[in-house]
Image (cartoon, rainbow, N blue to C red):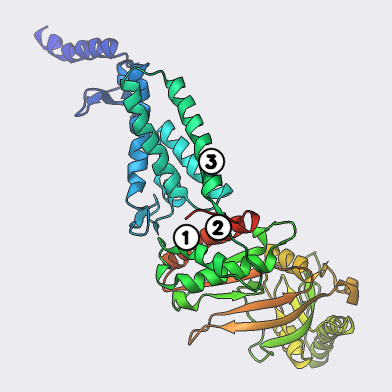
Amino acid sequence: FFFLILVRRPSLEWDRRRRRDGVSGGREERGARGRMSLAFDEYGRPFIIIKDGGAKKRIKGLEAQKANILAARTVARTLQSSLGPKGMDKMLQSPDGELTISNDGATILEQMEVENQIGKLLVELSRSQDHEIGDGTTGVVVLAGSLLEQAETLLDKGMHPLRVAEGFEMAAKVAHETLDKISRKFEFTKDNLEPLINTCMTTLSSKIVSRCKRSMAEHCVKAVMAIADLERRDVNLDLIKVEGKVGGSIEETSLIYGIVVDKDMSHPQMPKEVNDAKIAILTCPFEPPKPKTKHKVDIDTVEKYERLHEAEQKYFTDMIQKCKDSGATLIICQWGFDDEANHLLYRNDLPAVRWVGGVEIELIAMATGGRIVPRFVELSSDKLGSAGKVREISFGTTKDTMIAIEDCAHSKAVTILVRGGNRMIVEETKRSLHDALCVARNLVRDNSIVY
């Protein structure tokens, strides 16, 4: 009897603890914190029970306002050290270990993964500033944090939040009127770009490219002026493509009046430059047709092999002849080439670029005025695109090459090719150039500045 009591006593204690804690079954182990428990179900699978649901409380009134202001000030204080010419860059690590080094406010806030709802509002504020203006993403967050800091003082004095908000709106109206009064307009033309260049240099002073800000500002201004419609005062930044290539130094960044594709000629002995190019844009491969069903070919004599080889040669010859009959001097294909076809293209003096992506194919078609051809039988002279020059760019002693399509017939698209020692430098330079391009675009729209 005594032995039975000893055996049943732990079971009674476990039932009592289970009823008290509300656990439906299983064995429970308490962690270091009393608010969290680790439990196991009848199959031995662990799960965590959070017990602090009742500990949460709702705050309201002045306490809630101060908590929101504190959250916004915390986010703004994070960006204060990256503001201005002496601002420092932030190093951010993503969950998968990827590093980002930047002093661009919008980039930093997007990488920070802010959880607080008020902090997310500041992230949206910085993002909207980046989309609308392009520059000032750090300053707008710091300014908002400073205004909220001053608003906290007014709230402590008993002023109603709506009155504080009305005062900020009145102050913004007065600030707009004052800026309009003290602003100066400067005139610029395509021959006199110095005012635009000086303004873009001011933008780049706080960036990683500050040591070569003069050349960068010139690239940005020339790119904007190449696509700008000065009569309508309109600039379509979608026509400016910023490409990056790791290697070299920042000073080697160049402006190309055309489109750059990260490909090379399909044969190493093909010409590296084609002037007054007539471009055939194909989405069909240079390969013999293949049956869609399972097939087997038995070749047991030399004559059969030669007959098969001749038929294959005829396919390739017909394909290349159709390209030459259309008047094309350059082939751009979305798919690959058979080795035999590649050799025949070289023998027929027909340069070709293969494995060009679908997005790039469409961009080339729009810029050159060509039509995308899905079958060789549809290829004709009226579907060819035209460009003033197509050349292969090589980079130093490396084997990296890119294709530049310049002086396109139907587009004023330009490309800024960014160089840098590593990927992080290239990415930060591209972000800096985006800010300068947006400033130049804004000055074309409204040429008012404040000293």
Quadrant in the picture for residue 373: bottom right
The residue that appears at 46% across and 20% down in the rendered structure is: 162
Q: Nearer the viewer, residue 248 or 332?
A: 248
Contact flag, marks 2 and 3 (Cβ < 8 Å): no
How far across and how far down the image is residue 354, in percent?
69, 76
Q: Quick check: 269 above or below 432?
A: below
Q: Residues within 10 Å of mark 2 (few under 14, many from 20)?
A: many
Real-space Cα separation, disc 2 to disc 1, in angstroms:
8 Å
Return the residue nearer the eye: 309 or 228: 228
The percent coordinates of residue 116 (x first, y second) are 40, 33
Residue 81 vs residue 95, the one in the foreground: 81
Q: Which residue is mark 3?
A: 176
Q: Are marks 3 and 1 in contact (CB under 8 Å)?
A: no
Q: Please tell me which of labels 2 and 3 falls first in the chain.
A: 3
| Residue 433, above or below 302 | above
SS for callout 3: helix
Give the residue furthest to the left.
2
Q: Earlier in the sequence, mark 3 or mark 1?
A: 3
Q: Identify which amino acid the numbered label 1 is placed on.
A: Thr
Amino acid on which disc 3 is placed:
His
Helix, strand or loop at mark 2: helix
Instruction: Nearest to the eye among marks 2 and 3: give it.
Output: 3
- Residue at 67% across / 58% down in the picture? 235
Q: Is residue 59 visible?
A: no
- Give the x, y percent position of residue 311: 85, 84
Pointer 2 residue: 439
x%, y% of residue 276? 78, 84
Q: Quadrant of the N terminus?
A: top left
Residue farthest front in this picture: 181
Could you classify mark 1 by the number of other residues whose Cα lies within 10 Å: few (under 14), some (14-19), or many (20 or more)?
A: many
**Which of pointers 2 and 1 lies earlier in the amino acid sequence?**
1
